[in-house]
Image: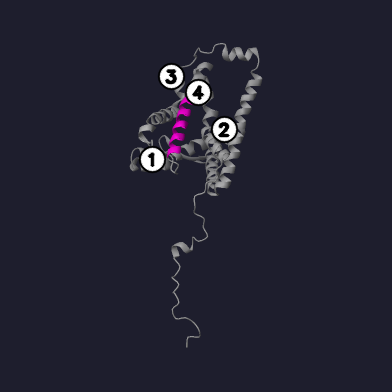
Amino acid sequence: MHNGASTSETPIPPADESTAGNAGLDTEFHRGLGLFDATMVVVGSMIGSGIFIVPATMAGQLGSPGWLLVAWLITGVLTVSAALSYGELAAMMPQAGGQYLYLREAFSPLLGFLYGWTLFLVIQTGFIAAVAVAFARFAGTLWPIISEEKYLLGPWHLTPGYALSLSTAQLVGMLMILFLTATNVCGLRYGKLVQNLFTVAKTGALLGLIGVGLILGWNAEAVSANFGDLWTPRGKLTDLGGGLTAATAFGLFVALCESQTGSLFSSDA
């Protein structure tokens, strides 16, 4: 007896175990950054720890307001050249990948591959560590307990000239890295909120410092002290490189790329 059931029913294939567990996961690439968010990412990347650390060192070495301004002017021109270059490249290749993509298309997939792993293992990790150290150093000016001389563990001298230790400054730096890592893991919405808040805060701090300087320096004595002897260097002009180390190398390389974009990347080349 068939009980009214058809014997030609199509068999249901078994569920694919590789996709069954991902049925509820959203793995698509989301474009969740608006104009303000993207601007804050760029501004936050450019305004790092260097602007708070380097000027005092440069001013002490040069001793000349004029040459100090020239150093920053040159750096600014190189930075604008780099920004125009990346804008050109991004417009021609609107894909994810950044410098990896540009190196791959300009030279070879091998160079793009090597750059990607170098960025992951050396460049970005070293930059993150440097910024964490700078953050802990500045935090120590507010809270003296945060210091490279206040050890929580050690130091244990392993070899002559090398010791293993953990200071309060190192701990603060590591905690900051963990906090920012967790921020990125939480997703784009939370990450861009933290990025925007931090960028607005440090940009506001810089604008506040500029405003205080203009207010306090708006008198004849301050103007004479700062601009009365504008171009006489009291340090070494070779110290001009203090403001142009990473920025100069980066800017010169990308400025060279800018002059080659027509032949390398142009659609009508």
Q: Is residue 209 left or right of residue 99?
A: right
Other residues around mark 1 within 10 Å, as few (<14) / some (14–19) / many (≥20) = some
Which numbered dot is residue 138? 2
SS at circle 1: helix
Nearest to the eye among marks 1 and 2: give it. 1
Q: Quadrant of the C terminus?
A: top left
User: Chief secondary structure of the magenta span?
Assistant: helix
Magenta residues span 75-92
Nearest to the eye among marks 2 and 3: give it. 3
Residue 10 in which image quadrant: bottom left
Other residues around mark 3 within 10 Å, as few (<14) / some (14–19) / many (≥20) = few
Q: Earlier in the sequence, mark 1 or mark 3?
A: 1
Q: Earlier in the sequence, mark 1 or mark 2?
A: 1
Nearest to the eye among marks 3 and 4: give it. 4
SS at circle 3: helix
SS at circle 4: helix
Residue at which label 1 appears: 115
Q: Earlier in the sequence, mark 4 or mark 1?
A: 4
Q: Earlier in the sequence, mark 2 or mark 3?
A: 2
Residue at which label 3 appears: 238
**What amino acid is found at the position of numbered circle 2 in the picture?**
Phe
Kindly identify the residue that appears in the image at 36 percent across and 40 percent down: 105
SS at circle 2: helix
Residue 43 in which image quadrant: top right
Residue at which label 4 appears: 72
Q: Is residue 143 visible?
A: no
In the rendered image, residue 209, in percent from the top left (x then y), is placed at 62, 26
Q: Is residue 88 magenta?
A: yes
Disc 3 to disc 4: CB gap under 8 Å? no
Q: Is residue 249 left or right of residue 142?
A: left
**What amino acid is found at the position of numbered circle 4 in the picture?**
Trp
